[in-house]
Amino acid sequence: MIFSVPRRMATAAAIAVAGLLAATAPAALAAPTAVSAATPPDIPVANVKAHLSQLQTIASNNSGNRAHGRPGYKASIDYVKAKLDAAGFTTSLQTFTSSGSTGYNLIADWPGGDPNSVLMAGAHLDSVTSGPGINDNGSGSAAILETALAVSRAQLQPTKHLRFGWWGAEELGLIGSKYYVNNLSSTERGKFAGYLNFDMIGSPNPGYFVYDDDPTIEQTFKDYYAGLGVPTEIETEGDGRSDHASFKNVGVPVGGLFTGASRTKSSSQAQKWGGTAGQAFDRCYHSSCDTTSNINDTALDRNSDAVAYAIWTLGTATTPPPGSSFENTTDVAIPDSPGAAVTSDILVTGVPGNAPATTKVDVNIIHTYRGDLVIDLVAPDGSTYRLKNSSWDSGDNVIATYTVNASSEVANGTWKLRVQDVASWDTGYINSWKITF
Ligand code: DTR
Ligand code: CA
Ligand code: ZN
Ligand code: ZN
């Protein structure tokens, strides 16, 4: 059941929508290309903490928690919704039933952007019954709320349609987010360019983990942290452990950030991130001590700014036009026979869907007696396409264009050119190669 409460629309403005993405299959994210990308704002961590204080007060006034089916959860929903309504978002409350209680998802749309390319940020708003749930997951909820308010303050005009979601009953098993995606038609699911999940992003003994799902989203977060000079690790316990799983299960590109729960920080992690080795990232995980004092302000600040960076970068990016080319010009020596094959890699991002049947591979190899060489194209999933066999061809160098039917391959990912010298005495190197979709 959805109640849509249209609010003051943002100032109507013609938005140059570049590159409508296919509305049938989940449209992959465009690699950020600087066209009119606005500069991501700093998210004031004081504002984020003010939201956490409100959530703490709500819990304190409602038996110490904000759990599904309890008054503290609906009070949390009402707090967040009021902020968004006042900021010009179109909000809707989606209700569902779980464990005999009414649950609520809050969905907030920022008017404008390409309706066929939805970028969504989400966080579960419910706590466990044993505590106020300020890190788990007031932190994610407050960070995306303040980012949404920053979108409004900036009157951002993104190329994508921005949507924010606060999920109910995550702690009962991703109930709210599952209900949301299950009630999307396949056409609506296909309009998602990406879903960004933020569940526990202010842990008191923080790690800096990036989900390793969609490569473009992952790279966006890695770029942000590289800019800070903060090392990150791949999030290894996340699969299925939070609301991004609901979206991933229906084919939506997902990503997100995490600062750790009950697992223990290692000594090497403490060396690179600070904090305490041998101690849990969050000692108050699912406990009554998950209060406003259970937050690391630096982690909350960095991750709140990361949310804004991703929304601004991915939300204003434009899809590269068809015929996108990606090139590697690094020389790679080819050992003489009987040496092993060598490879040269190209990471492709921002190309929606599959590669075309007329994928072009331009090869430039400097090598006497080119008949020695066997050349393959290797797709991101490991599928191999033979470009050239060895032969008695005594000519020098391979400077050629090959056309490959790679239509069964997803375009985004790491493609490899693999070259092996299978006859002795002549040698050379890969000078460069290019793949064009
Ligand atoms: N399931 C989440 C906490 C959690 C545990 N591992 C991960 C990995 C990635 C995101 C979240 C989590 C919860 O208790 O809400
Ligand atoms: Ca900040
Ligand atoms: Zn939890
Ligand atoms: Zn959580």
Image (cartoon, helix red, strand yellow):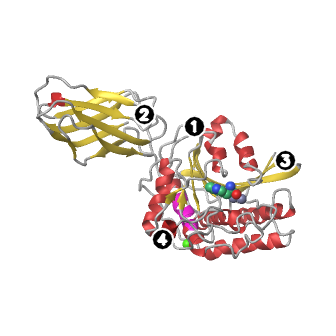
Q: Which mark is residue 355?
A: 2
What residue is disc 4 on?
271
10 Å crowding of disc 2: few (<14), some (14-19), many (20+) = many
Gap in angstroms between the C-alphas marked 1 and 4 = 46 Å
Dot 3 falls on a residue whose secondary structure is strand
What residue is disc 1 on?
23
- C-beta proximity under 8 Å, tags 1 and 4: no
Dot 4 falls on a residue whose secondary structure is helix
| Residue situated in front as seen by the camera: 334 or 220 | 334
Magenta highlight range: 303-311
Dot 2 falls on a residue whose secondary structure is loop
Residue 160 seen = yes
Q: Ligand 3 falls in which quarter?
A: bottom right
10 Å crowding of disc 3: few (<14), some (14-19), many (20+) = some
Q: Is residue 100 above or below residue 141?
A: above
Residue 308 shown in magenta: yes
Q: Identify the residue at image location x=86%, y=63%.
A: 71
Q: Main secondary structure of the magenta part?
A: helix
Residue 132: % across, % down? 77, 68
